Image (cartoon, grey):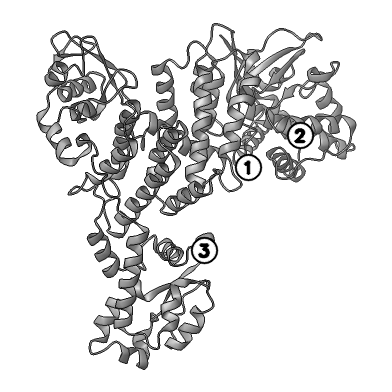
Amino acid sequence: MDANSRNILGLMSEMNVRFVVPVYQRPYSWDDTQCAQLWDDILSCGRRRQGTHFTGSIVTIQDGQLSDQGVAPLLLIDGQQRITTITLLLVALARYAGRHPQERLSFTKAEVLQSGFLTNHFRGGEDFYKLTLSKGDRDAYRALVDALVAGRDAELDPLSRLAQNLEFFERRVEALDDVSLVWTGLQRLEVVSISLTQGTDDPQVIFESMNATGKDLTNADLVRNFVLMSYPMAEQQSLYRTYWAPIEQILATDTIGFDDAFDDFIRSYLSVVHAPTSMAKVDVYQAFKRYVLFHGFNENDRMKNLSLKLKRFARYYAAVTRGQVDDEQLAQAFGRIAQLDAPVVNPLLISLFDGYEHHEFDREAFLLMLRAIESYLFRRSVCDCAQSVLAPFFSSLIARIDAVRSEEGQVVDAFVAMLLNEEGTQRRFPTDAEFAHALATRDTHSLAGALYLLARIDEELEPTDTVALEAYNWSLEHVMPQRALEDDAWRAALGDAPERTFEECINNLGNLTLTPHPFDLQEGSFEQKQRRIAESPLALANDILAATEWTPAQIKERAERLVERALAVWVRPELPEGAGAAFRLSARAAATHKVTFAELFAAGLVQMDDALVSVSPLHPGRATVTSTGKIMLANGEMFEDPAEAYTRFLSSVGAANTDQDGWMYWRRGDGGPLLDDLRAELA
């Protein structure tokens, strides 16, 4: 590695080199904020009589041999945003000079064009352009340079960052009294130029450490670079097209940018492969990097295998979060779960989708599990169950189901049993009685899923009418209006204690329906309400339209009818007869308190020299089972209990939190079952 201070224009104007942005780099993305900062730095430097201004680093590595024309391609590992932006400013200056030939400037258009900043003037083809951008920016940039050389305007997409930033600089240049200040300031910009040596320096390490200025890299940038940089530069273009571009196409949408979608996707992926460890608060890139290195994906061409897996899981992610799957029933099932706004369940859904695609259970079984998840989530929401317990619970489900999958067990029976076996805990699946009582008595109007609740009930009432589920722009409508106490007729209908009865009835399920109007009519007679509600085609409103009056008694009766419908929609599954005892609550409780590691060893479920692998993505590590059935850590310490061994292991690696149950964090071998699942077999 060779590092030295350079004038940035001097670096850009070197003869017989061209700068190439690698295919795995993000597109040009600086916006007004970064451009304004650079502009201010340049003007400040130009107004000073002397001195320079440091503006970061430029990291390059030579990409192969010299071309036939003697031009050396230099890959821009870091600094592409800065160099591209300065190039746009040079174009703006050249165009300004061309429009103002009579103005006395310290530079000319010809000087900008012929000094080697934009082109290798006497070379052709690829070698003509001093800068080669990546992805969709390449052709637009070349068109801009060609137009400048030919003396005409370039036709750029006005929404592209190239066009917007060029316009930004042209506005700033036109507004200046002395444009020569910009040219002077550019001459004084300094960078640290770092030239890497192929086969000796690691571009990824340099790339990570140099990301200190400009626009922060996203996790998508870092992961993409880490994956593709593990291959020789000659292969990266092909690898990008084969593996990474499809992931971008799968995850990006018109409304969700790729970077945001990728963050959530890669967190979900890591949650699946690291279960039962929750990944909610970890540094996604660092966790991914540790995962790759720990499992050796960076060796022996295995990164391609990982890339294929990422592509497959990206498809699962798009299916479970957006319903992007060809099977209509699966798409509807995923869409209903997504309506509950509980992204914490996505890793579990992805893991189950993987099992379905590998034919570990059939389509009907998969739909049954999805309906169970929908019911579980919604019943808990209605019953105001704690949501904070779901992330660790779903993570434990992934690990436990994974153990069943690896042993080719009955996944569906195990899954249903694991959901139902949490009775009496914060993770419980609310019973019919608890769910019905909550629905009949709670303030339904304040329920986050109130629209979803009524739409799903309407679909159950009239299965052929999908208008409610297809148009979630419906509004909640109170049948008895919210200003009922101000109306004599409504007040009389509320009986002897109108204030108390109003509070009990107004937001009750029986008093709510859906309307296509964007607002709730807060006053009016029952007849006016009926005419308004009649404008909607929903079966949900039939009993309201058939009524001749609307009293607390009618509200209570309608609530009871809707509760019965809700019990038919959000069914609590029953544990299949004959499901394995290991999945029952009592059996797992017995396993938790009675089965010891020595008993696992005596039963042959763990054997001498077996590796116990930590499943924590933050703290990977191994222990070994000794000939006497003890757990030996890497430092030679031995323990009889997995919990004690794991606590000591975490302490030895400097973990901030050592309070983790080793039964849930030691796995027998790579990809093997958790010790917690092994001891359940002896219960």
Q: Which residue is mark 3?
A: 464
Q: Could you tell me which secondary element the residue under label 1 belongs to?
A: helix
Residue 48 placement (x, y as % from top left): 65, 31
Q: Nearer the viewer, mark 3 or mark 2?
A: 3
Amino acid type at circle 1 is Asp
Q: Which residue is mark 1?
A: 32
Q: Is residue 100 visible to the viewer in this orientation of the structure? A: no
Q: Is residue 488 left or right of residue 535?
A: left
Estimate the x, y position of residue 606 in percent, counting from the top left: 21, 17
Looking at the image, residue 180 sits to the left or right of residue 336; the answer is: right
Q: Nearer the viewer, residue 532 or 401?
A: 401
- The image shows residue 469, relative to residue 182, as above or below, that is below
Label 3 vs label 1: CA separation? 52 Å
Q: Which residue is mark 2?
A: 140
Disc 3 from disc 2: Cα separation:
50 Å
Residue placed at 64% from the left, 32% from the top? 27
The residue depicted at 70 percent of the width and 41 percent of the height is 160
Q: Quadrant of residue 676?
A: top left
For the N terminus, the quadrant is top right
